[in-house]
Amino acid sequence: MTKIGIILGSTRPGRNGEGVANWVLDVAARRTDAEFELVDLLDYKLPHLDEAMPPAYGQYSQPHTIEWASKIASFDGFVMVTPEYNHSTSGALKNAIDFLFAEWNNKAVGFVGYGSVGGARAVEHLRLIAGELMMADVRAQVTLSLVNDFENFSKLVPSERQEQALNAMLDQLVAWSQALAPLRTPVAA
């Protein structure tokens, strides 16, 4: 069975991402074409990148990196739930991505952004990063507006249109994750 990790990309106290990620998981759990698991960056306590060797070498020395690498390696694809902070993704998500290399390769990724313009600029930055990591980003995405999709800018109340957008992204993500399966072997830098 295809395994998809839903990465909650914010660690900020009072984050809206927790509600967004749980909504993604709730919708995804109704599907039968893949298994979905929530991966909360708060559970991994990753410091600022502290590995001496570049991630492309795969020579991880820190226990937190080894744990993170094992978790990410266990998935066939990802949904990255990202806030938009200052026209980009969160520093916590970027840092978590930068810890690894081969564990991301030849896997599909879809995005759920949230913010004043639906997290669209954060997602665009993540698409550039995904390309460098040999990830295939799917076209469909979810853009949740703090004005239209949240009550009081904090409680997610997604419309039916947003659930349709999420399912369209998940359809592409699962299909691409399955299609890329033959390519998932360690890649030398």
Image (spheres, rainbow, N blue to C red):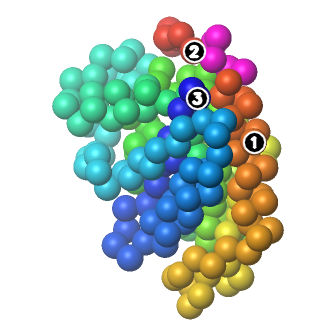
Circle 3 residue: 2
Q: Please tell me which of labels 2 and 3 falls first in the chain.
A: 3
Quadrant holding the N terminus: top right
**Residue at point 43%, 60% (across, down):** 10
C-alpha gap between disc 3 and disc 1: 12 Å
Camera sees residue 81: no
For residue 171, the mark is: 1
83 vs 43: above or below: below
Q: Position of residue 96 (x, y in %)?
A: 40, 43
Amino acid of disc 1 = Asp
At label 2, counting other C-alpha atoms closer than 10 Å, the crowd grade (few under 14, some 14-19, many 20 or more) is: some
Helix, strand, or loop for circle 2?
loop
18 in the magenta segment: no
Q: From mark 2 to mark 3, how far is it between C-alphas?
A: 13 Å
The earlier-in-sequence mark between 2 and 1 is 1
Residue at 56%, 59% (x, y): give it.
26
Mark 1 Cα within 10 Å, few/some/many (few <14, many 20+)?
some
Task: Name the amino acid type tagged 2.
Answer: Arg
Residue 102 versus residue 99 in the image, above or below = above
Picture disc at residue 184: 2
Q: In front here: 69 or 48?
A: 69
Magenta region, main secondary structure: helix
Apparent side of residue 54 relative to residue 118 in the rendered image (left or right): left
Marks 3 and 1, the one that precedes in the sequence? 3
Q: What residue is shown at x 62% (from left), y 72% (from top)?
A: 115
Residue 180 colored in magenta in the image:
yes
Q: Secondary structure at mark 1?
A: helix
Q: Nearer the viewer, residue 63 or 174?
A: 174
Camera-side residue of 57 and 3: 3
| Range of magenta residues | 179-183
Give the Cα distance between marks 2 and 1. Answer: 20 Å
Instruction: Give the class, few, some or many, for how many residues have Cα within 10 Å of label 3's Cα (few <14, many ≥20).
Output: some
